[in-house]
Amino acid sequence: MEPTGRDGAAGLLAESSPTRKRKMGHGSQASHRTPAKEPTTEEPSRMKRLFGFEVADVTSWHRFVCLMNRPTDPASLGIFRFLFGLLMVLDIPQERGLGYLDYKYLDGLEVCRFPLFNNLGPLPLDWMYLVYVIMLSGALGIMLGCCYRLSCLLFALPYWYIFFLDKTTWNNHSYLYGLIGFQLAFVNANRYWSLDGLWNPRKRNAHVPLWNYTILRTQIFIVYFIAGLKKLDADWVEGYSMGSLSRHWLFDPFKLFLSEEMTNLLVVHGAGLILDLTAGYLLFFDLTRPLALFFVSYFHCMNSQLFSIGMFSYTMLATSPLFCYPDWPRRLVTKLPYLLRKVLPLVEAPQCSQDCVYTTAGRTGKPQRTRARASGDDASEEQSKVRSKGAAETRLSLRQKFGALFTVLYILEQFFLPYSHFITQGYNNWTNGLYGYSWDMMVHSRSHQHVKITYRDGLTGEIGYLNPGVFTQTRRWKDHADMLKQYATCLSGLLHNYNVSEPEIYFDIWVSINDRFQQRLFDPRVDIVKADWSPFQRTSWVMPLLIDLSPWRQKFQEMESTLDNQTAVVFIADFPGLLLENFVSEDLGNTSVHLLKGEVQVEIVKEEKNYTLKEGEGMQLPAGEYHKVFTVSQYPSCYMYTYVNTTAVVLEQNLTKLQELKEKVQNGTETEPLPAELETVLHGEIDEMNVTDPLIQAFLRRQRRLEESERRRNATIIDRFMRFSYKKYFLFRRSFLLTVISLRNLALGRPPLEQLAKEVAYASMKYEEPTGSKSMKLENMPQEDHSEL
């Protein structure tokens, strides 16, 4: 609804106060005549002052439709339309993937994909570029308010096609962009500061129905509030969801008076929970809105630095003014110099619109009046009756009824969908549903310790292993049963090309969620190719999360605090009857296993010996050999590996000695003669290409990293801005040139392969940043690992 504070909602066409008139007669009689009492201004009720409407406005469907179609200033909606379109224009080459579309949808690429519907696939590469061009033109049309309805369709339809095409890219803000694009297709956001308004006088600066604001405001309220409800999860409240985030430099001011642990608990988790739960309410009311605008702006600006989330932070900043009075752009423009007003949005009052429901006062600009009665209370009562009668007699169009019905159904659906996981049980794993539409932002963090893919030839029985992530461009499949099923089905088809018949595929994936034990997510004994999966039934081969072991996390911290900086630890939990096969690298010269709970048998494969461990016992594991850990207790076993990377320790010691030697050479305190190669290296006069010693190569690489880190740390704001600008320029340049090449291919056909390769190489020019004596090439490519392809 409309936020209020100036005696009612800003969009409400309030009746003007009747002026007190004095009737003058002729002669002396006039001076003694008592003037007739005129009706006094009606005091708005508390309900109206707080929420912008009366209780009577929602006592019937007819009155509710009138309320939802109340004329409202289009200014704030028009500004939001412009900002959202602009942000989507910037988002499409970046997070939507236009800048690296050829890497993802290259024709003939053997890669497994993860669409929402299995029969949904990408178009040929050149046609995918055309889809992106259509989406980009739609975003540009939304920004300019040009052919607005068509532009919304041109943006929304390709957007949802691309969204459904790849579940691995799903996240909450990408889902939100699609929802806003869908909403904009129904609202009249082109009634202010739009090209449509220049071409059509009826659309220029015209009122919009109140439901246009209601649906957008409620959507943003849901984003905040449901995210807050999801953060009531025990892991978030206890500070385990984002345990390492407090180490970021943005939280350094809080560490002046709080420890890092308390900063994590109170600021990262506590303040984040309170903000999400209250932001929607605080933005609604006039008294609390300035405070809310400050905190949500600070919150989103921090997020833009903490996470790689594209335009999300800026989109949420653009939604905040929707909660202000709709005429705020006009009031802002009137305070600017007159010369600027010619190019800025209009400041004149909006004209009437056929889409809104008006009283007589709303159409004529004059207040409805009633005959004065004996007292002001009687006059107020009469005015209220007239308004109620007018609302009851108002004839509503089908469009106005549809707008109110659409608003109600959409809001109910958005409140229901985040809790609809009891229907789509097949998408539930340790967390409910596909990540993206539940607003459970940052509630769950995962780490993967071990991933093994085993295949077995169904005819010969031959067993082999696949590199984790082979034939994929993503890692998200490891956490979702539906994607794992799609991946196994795809691998089964691809393995036929490698002479594997009727392949069976088994996954052994170990995951820790929110700093718990590393444990299996899927049953490693199940052939996923033949396993059953349905979106509406629980997946039987998903292993349960060992919630009962969650209190061990506090003990983990105590154990880790007793270790030195060179010793690492991994905590493992396994189910009865299962085993973990592991290989200890030769670099890990001091590896041991300690049993925390249950009973296990450790088999050293090479020695063919078994060792039984009970609670509190441990043993040393030989390096360079396989071992197996069998859980033989009737309940889950818990154990931990402690290890020291002796190779890394020795390397660090040697690098430290070289650094100390270099400092002595530079300050002239080193008197011992040095080898010729080492002397030139320590003086910085040699290139890594001429060095054969691995230790010297590692030292040079480390020196360059330190120099680059120091250079960036001391860079000025102008240097950082220029670096950022250059990177974005080359990304947008590549997007534009490859799009032009693809459209040319569609129109004229593809040129010879040699010419096409030169064109792509020219479009893929990289930004070279000077780093002293050398240049470092920075690619504007996605961060996924393509080495398997």
Image: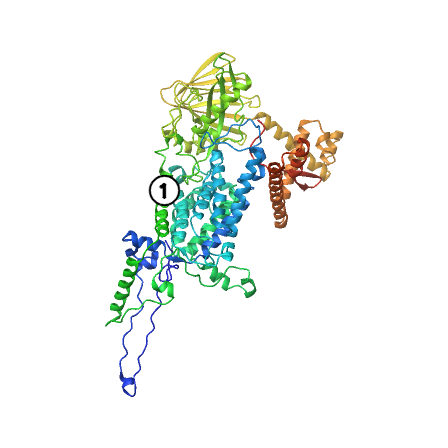
Q: Does any portion of residue 765 appear in the rendered image? A: no
Q: Is residue 617 above or below residue 783?
A: above
Total count of labels: 1
**Residue extending farthest left:** 374
Question: How far across and how far down the image is residue 650, in percent?
Answer: 61, 27
User: Image check: 351 left or right of 683?
Assistant: left
Question: How far across and how far down the image is residue 56, in percent?
Answer: 28, 56
**Residue extending farthest bottom:** 28
What kind of residue is marked 1?
A: Glu
* Rendered image quadrant of residue 373: bottom left
Colouring: rainbow
Front-lying residue, 132 or 355: 355
**Residue extending farthest front:** 748
Front-lying residue, 373 or 520: 373
Q: Quadrant of the C terminus?
A: top right
Name which residue lies at 49% across and 34% down. 166
User: Image check: 478 left or right of 655?
Assistant: left
Binning the other alpha carbons within 10 Å of mark 1 as few (below 14), some (14 to 19) or many (20 upward) gives: few
* Rendered image quadrant of residue 629: top left
Name which residue lies at 47% across and 34% down. 167
Q: Which residue is mark 1?
A: 413
Front-lying residue, 504 or 595: 504
Q: Does any portion of residue 207 appear in the rendered image? A: yes
Name which residue lies at 42% across and 32% down. 553
Question: How far across and how far down the image is residue 196, in percent?
Answer: 50, 54
Find numbered disc 1 in the image and state the secondary structure of the residue it sits on: helix
Name which residue lies at 71% across and 30% down. 689
Question: How far across and how far down the image is residue 467, in percent?
Answer: 54, 23
